[in-house]
Image (cartoon, grey):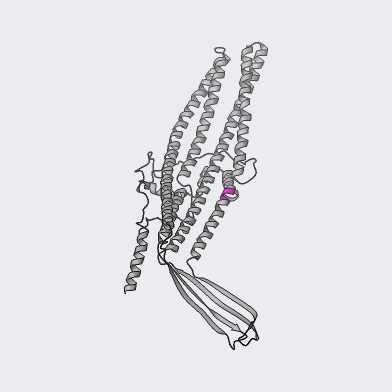
Amino acid sequence: MRRGAASLLALLALQACAGPYRPAPGDAQLPPPPQWRREEGAIKPISDGWWRAFGDPALDRLVAQALAGNEDLKIAAARIEEARAQLRLTDARRLPTLGLGLSGASSRSVNAFGTGVDQEQGQAAVSSAYEVDLFGRLRQSSEAARADLLATDQARAALRLSLIATVVDGYVGLRALDSRLEIVNETIATRGKERDLIHRRYAAGYASLLDERQAAAAYEAAARLRPATQRAISARENALGVLAGTTPGPIARDRDVSFAADIAIPSSLPSQLLRQRPDIAEAESRVAAADHRLGAARAAFMPQLQLSASGGAAVSTLLSSPITIFNLGGSLLAPLFEGGRHHAEQDLAASRRDQAAYAYRAAVLQAFREVEDAMAGVAFLSEEARTAQREVAADRAACEAARRRYDAGYASYLEQLDSERALLAARIDEDDLHFQRLSAIVALYRSLGGGWSSDLMPRDYPAQTEG
């Protein structure tokens, strides 16, 4: 009884050496906003193939090619295998070890009578060792490795989502350049006809040299836009090719991108965002892993119980029959003085857990910001695009009126040229706003987690309690 009480007091003393459990910092908590700044209806669940809503088969093929060939995604998959192997390694430390030993020798020795004795001997033994995880140190290490595996898988999911969104946004930008090239080509054709017409009128004496020179300059100004746009198209195609894991080259386009579906601005609860975004799930798993490592560091203050056993047989030419051998034992190792090593390891684990908690808060704040920015982008760009449509209609009417006034001789060609320049600028702005809205829709999908899905779903992470 006295020995048992003394042992219990010793264990309590060792536990007290670890000090009280240090919870995560309170200011790392982040209350979700009560509502989004813009609420225009509930969002529908986002499917895994959300980019197919653009209705472009070439885009579908490009995304599939990127998912299959992107090098960064392959590296992320290899990291998952590394984390899986690390989990198997930590789990293996909780299991008994079993080994087989074989030995043999041939020897000659001198006996007590001074004569030589030849001997052939051999021995075979099976040994086993096991650490009894009394205080959860090995279990906490395994849980930390399991959380790391979840975080690595979620990091790959975040990379996959980012890759898809980048490819879709790049393709939208490519189609925007295609559309701008069409506008430029139409303008070049129109101004080419005007240049030829005014040249003929000048040759016939019905137009001034100034008009003829202005028409030629207007044509060249429009023609200069074509190589600049083509250069931008080539650079965008090369970038998309690298994302898809291929050598730079042309990107196939089947038809114009048009997004006919009405995207509702979400008013869903922030908790839905937290469950869907892989980067937030990754940050949550990092907190869990760091907290489990803190638990393992605290358990290191407690004794470690090691059990060992071995058994086998020994044979010799000097023995009439083999003899059995065995060994049973155990050891209890309790830290008494480590020069502050365990305390330093505990403080190190606690600091890393706090860092992970603050990183989680930062990830959540960034997610809220991205959702708000994306929703505002879709809403305000839609409004701006409608204004741009009205501006193009007004500039087109003004251009027609200026052309009629010039043909009738009531205005100079400069007045018509100014109206044409304004129309060209308005058409380019309208087209850019249309594709900027499509990019904002892509950003909205990305900020809401896209269509991320994984076999390793993030677990709810409760705060660790003492013990």
**Residue 448 part of the magenta segment:** no
The prevailing secondary structure element of the residues shown in magenta is helix
**Image location (x, y in percent) of residue 452:** 48, 50
Q: Quadrant of residue 123?
A: bottom right
Examine the rendered structure and indicate whether residue 131 appears above or below residue 323. Answer: above
Q: Residue at x 51, y 20 (%)?
A: 398
Residue 175 position in % (x across, y down)? 57, 37
> Depth check: 86 or 417 in front?
86
* Residue pictured at 57% horizontal, 85% vertical: 322
Give the vertical position of 18 relative to 367 (above or below): below
Closer to the camera in the image, 190 or 268 = 268
Q: Is residue 34 left or right of residue 200?
A: left
Dividing the image into 4 quarters, which one contains the C terminus? Answer: bottom left
- Which range is magenta? 70-74
Is residue 122 something one can see in this rendering?
Answer: yes
In this rendering, position of residue 357 left or right of residue 166: left
Q: Quadrant of residue 43?
A: top left
Seen from the viewer's position, the closer of residues 22 and 74 is 22
- Compared with residue 116, is residue 100 higher up or lower down, i.e. above or below? above
Q: Is residue 325 left or right of residue 376?
A: right
Q: Position of residue 446 (x, y in %)?
A: 48, 44
Identify which residue is drawn at 61% across, 43% down. Answer: 242
Quadrant where the N terminus sits is: bottom left
Q: How many marks?
A: 0
Give coordinates of residue 224: x percent, y percent: 63, 26
Residue 293 visible within the image:
no
Considering only vertical position in the picture, is 285 above or below 448?
below
